[in-house]
Amino acid sequence: MLTFDRALANPLRASVMYPPDRRLFRPFAVAARVADLLAAVGPRAGLYAHVPFCETKCTYCDYETVPLGKYAGAGVEAYVQALCTELRTTLAALPRATTITGFDIGGGTPGAMSAEQFLRVIDTLGAARLAAGFEISTETTPTLAAADPPKWAAIRRAGVSRVSMGVQTDDEALLGRMNRAQDKSDRMRRGIDALRDAGFAIVNLDLMFALPGLTAERFIESVDFAIALAPDVITIYDTVYKNRGIATQARRWDLTPSPKDYGDQYDRAFLRLNAAGYRGRYGSVNFSRVPGRLGTSRYLESRILDGADYAGVGLYASSLAGNVWRFGKKSYGAWIEHAARGDLAAEDVYALPKAHVMAKYLLLALSYGYVDGARFQARFAERFSDRFARARSFAIDRGLLQQHGDDYTIVPGAFADLPGLRALFYPDDALPWLEVPL
């Protein structure tokens, strides 16, 4: 199939993130009241709060961030006040019958907030509309986790039950090139100890593979380092090169990874993690030793596996209601101005055709290693095998997917071919972007 070959010829375009370029969605931009969008959210929805402060901007990061040094103290407090106001307004706009599956407080670096500020954000949510199994999850850096263990104990007492610490690699030279020189290996060790001692139900550690210049041998050393720290979950993210910073960096050093590099690093880590008791399907980036848990937050599981709606608050945070995708204000000043007065403003709103929503759903579902046929049908009122009959047959014949009833899993050894597999689910108007260099 030509699409498969085109994607492998330009693999960094066909990453887990869809669309391959945001410009693809420009024809679907609409003017819409955010309150009307939120009023259309379904009966179960996730909730996300974005805290954009960072000590430094990592070269691989594609999220909206602002420098912590510029806003520390009074600036963070002003942001938290506006965030709580926007959260109250957002919750009031949701249908009364909507229950919240999970609440992720992400970033940026949420750990830039004090424990008291965390508590205020959580108290704004309340407890009246929480779904069974609801949890609150957040994230931190090794430096912030190690710096103040009592704060993390207080955050745990405030109701946060899952925390993720971004290590990415223990190669300190590579960390320096990624603008993360402050996160030394010793801080990683002390940080994980602080989070474990705080009593979080799940402590996750993030690694990244296929970083510029990272070899399979050096990545496995980072995997072994992570295993030795003994978190509950280890997540290994495949590096996405759509961000200009890391793409430029890789080109300058001639260190752009190939599909084979992605496959070699993933395959070795998959074997090592499962041997150490961290379970995950082949193709999944999540490896858990918590019985009954995949490792990700309840918010992400409902958003990705069920395709559930979600509401986002904070700087440039996104929301999805049905097929309508909304982003909050992108300018820090504009966001503060609108949020502080309870104005649900938007930078961008896209009314997406169903085919594009399906593509977004499937590419993210594949990061769990499979497509759940029942969940796909519940979300889109179509059978996966009917909608993608040709792509499905090609993937099975090519040894990329294997069928289990209505479900499909990635064939062990096929990770290197994932760019081609993902592109099989692209709508026709997305395919020309496979020819555009990053």
Image (cartoon, rainbow, N blue to C red):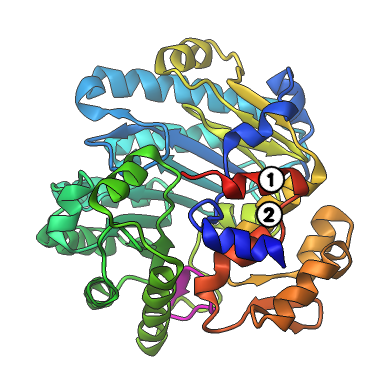
Quadrant position of residue 380:
bottom right
Whether residue 146 is visible here, answered yes or no, is: no
Residue drawn at the location 69% of the way across and 22% of the way down: 34
The boundaries of the magenta stretch are 278-288
Query: Which residue is tagged 2?
Result: 361
x and y percentages locating residue 367 in the rendered image: 55, 64
Quadrant position of residue 344:
top right
**Left or right: 12, with 298 as reference point:** left
Residue type indicated by callout 2: Tyr
Nearer-the-camera pick, 355 or 307? 355
Q: Secondary structure at mark 1?
A: helix
User: Looking at the rendering, in which quadrant would you find the N terminus?
Assistant: bottom right
Q: Nearer the viewer, mark 2 or mark 1?
A: 1
**Left or right: 180, with 161 as reference point:** left
Q: Secondary structure at mark 2?
A: helix
Q: Earlier in the sequence, mark 2 or mark 1?
A: 2
Query: Which residue is tagged 1?
Result: 430
Residue drawn at the location 36% of the way across and 43% of the way down: 61
Nearer-the-camera pick, 211 or 375? 211
Relative vertical location of residue 397 with respect to residue 100 in this rendering, above or below: below
